[in-house]
Amino acid sequence: MSQWSGKLRTALVYGFLWLMALLSIFPFVWMLISATNESHDITKGKMSFGNALTENYHKFAELFDVGLVFWNSGKVAILGSFLTLAVSSLAGYGFEIFRSPGRERVYQGVLLSMMIPFSALMIPLFILLASFDMLDTHMAVILPGIASAYMIFYFRQNTKSFPLELRDAARVDGLKEWQIFLFVYLPVMRSTYAAAFIIVFMTIWNSFLWPLIVLQSVELKTITLVLSSLGSSYTPDFGVIMVATILATIPTLVVFFAMQRQFVEGMLGSVK
Amino acid sequence: MRQASKPSSSRFFDINGWAFVSVAMALISVFMLYPIGKSLWMSVQSGQGTMTKFVGLGNVQRLLDDPMFLRALTNTSIFLVVQVPIMIVLALVMASCLNIPNLKGRGLLRTAVFLPCVTSLVAYSVLFKSMFSYDGVVNSTLMGLGLVSEAVPWLTDPFWARVVVIVAITWRWTGYNMIFYLAAMQNVDKSIYEAARIDGISATRRFLSITIPVLKPVILFTTVTSTIGTLQMFDEAMNITNGGPADSTLTLSLYIYNLSFKYVPNFGYAATVSYVIVVLVAILAFIQFYAAREREQ
C-alpha cells in the first residue's frame, strides 16, 4: 500500500516537473517554428516548420538595418556594463574597506535609494537630459544607470570575502590604495565581476522603457525598441517579428549557457 | 611625534574612502536624488508642457476623481493580488520537487524552468501576443485537447486579457524565484529531513513544518521584490495588450508614460501618479525591513 502511494507520488513529481519544463520551453520552440512560417500561418497556430525563414529575414532587413540595430544594442550594453562595473565596484570596495561613521550613513542612503521606482524618476530624468541637450543619444541611455545602487550593494557584499591580508601585504609593499584596488582586488575578484557583468549586460540589453523615452532617431534604436515597434503596428507581420525575437534572444541565451554558474551566482549575490 | 602621525594617517585613509565612492555618489546625486526631489516639486504643479502653475495638493485631489488613474490602480492591484501568490507557491513547489534526492534529469529540468528569465520582457511579450491571438496556437491546442469548445477571446476580452498578462508574467518569473528557493533549500541540513522522515512525518508535513519556516526570509525577499516589480509593470502591458481592451490592463507605469509622452504632456500630474508608486513601494520596503529585524531579535 505505502509502496504504491510512494510510486504514485514519484510519478506525480516527475509529471509535474516535466509539464512545467515543457510549458517553459514551449514558447522558445514556438518562436523557432514560427520564424520559418508566414504571418497568416503563425496567427492560425501552425505547429510545423515552413520555408519562409529567409523571406522573413529579408523583410526584416528591408525595414531595419539589422547590423546597425545590433551595433546599437551591443554598444549600449557593453559600454554601459563596463562603466557600471567600474563605478559600482569602486564604491562597493570603498564602503567596505574604508569604514567611517559618515560613510556608513551615506551607504544607508544608497540602500534606501534602491527602493525608488524608476517610474518616479523617468520624467525628471527626461527633463534633466533635455537640459544637458543629450536626448536622442546613446550616452543618455547609459548615464542614469551607471551608479547602480544594487551593484554597489552587490560589490560591497562580495568584498566581505576579499582577504584583508592581501591588502595589508600590499600596503607594506608600498602600493598606493588605487594600485591595491587595480592590481590586487580586481584580479582576485574576477568571478564576482563576471557574474555582475552578466546581470548588468542582460539588464541593459533587455531594457525598454528608458531607451523608448530617450531615443527618437531610427538609426539609434536598439533591438527591444525595434521589436516593440514591429509588434505594435496595425498589421503586425509575425514572421518578421519572430526573426527579430530570435535575434534579440540569441545573445542573452549564449551568455546564459556559456556562464550559467556565474549567472546564478550574480543573481543570488544579493541574498548571501 | 609618533603619536601625532596616527590620526593623520587615518585621515589619509578617509580621504581615500571618499575618493573611492565619489564618482558613484556624484552620479547618484545627479541621476537619483535630484530627480526624486524634482518630481516632488513637479507634483505640486500642473499644466501642459512648460506652462505650469503651482497647484499645491490640487494634483492629489485630481487623482481621486480620475477614473483612468483609479482604473490603473485597480488593475495593478489585481495583478499583484492574483499573480504574486500563484507564482510564489508554484516556485516553492517546483523548488522542493527539484530538491528531492536522486531526482533523474535534475540539471535539465532546472535549466528548462529557469530559461524564460533570460528573455527580454519585450521579446516574450510579443511572443505571447502571437501565441494568444484568436486563431493562435493556444486556442487551437486547447480546442484540440477538448478543454474548450470554442476559441477564447484572449486579447479582446477584458477578463481574458488580464489572464494572459498574469500567465505571461508567471511564465517569465517563476523559474527566477525558484532558483532563490532551491539555493536556500540546499543550505538546509539534510539530517533534519532525514530525522523527520524516520519519525514518519509525511512529505506534505515536512514541506509545511520544515521547508517553509526555514525559507521564510527568502520567501519574504522574493515576495517583496516581485511585488515591487509588478507595481512598476510596463513592458508587458505595453507590448501584449497596450493597456487594452477597454483599459483593462492599463498599469500605473503605462498611465504615467501616456500622461507624459502620449497625451498632451502634463508632467506635474504624471509625477503625482508616480509618487503613488513611491508610497506603495516604501510601505512594502518597511514591511520587509521590520520583518527582517524581528527575525534577528
Image: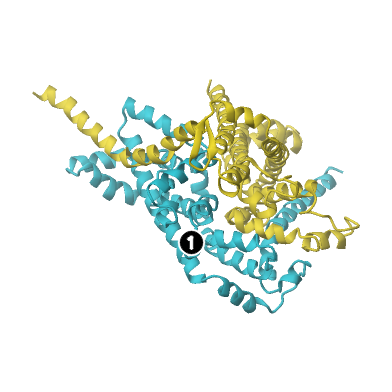
Chain colours: A cyan, B yellow
The kind of secondary structure element at disc 1 is loop
Front residue of A176 and B99: A176
Amino acid type shown at disc 1 = Ser
In this rendered view, identify the residue nearer to me: B231 or A94.
Answer: B231
**Toward which corner of the image does residue B240 lie, by quadrant?**
bottom right
Residue B18 picture location, percent across and down: 28, 35
Q: Position of residue B59 (x, y in %)?
A: 58, 30
Give how far across and how far down residue A93 sits, in percent.
34, 40
Left or right for B62, reference A256: right
Q: Is residue A23 above or below residue A120?
A: below
Tag count: 1
Q: Is residue A146 among the parts visible in the rendering?
A: no
Query: In the rendered image, which residue does mark 1 sit on?
Result: A217
Q: Residue at x 44, y 58 (%)?
A: A76
Q: Determine if residue A208 is in view.
A: yes
- Locate residue B256 relative to residue A219 in the image: left or right: right
Q: Chain of mark 1?
A: A
Relative image position of residue A9 (x, y in whole percent): 79, 46
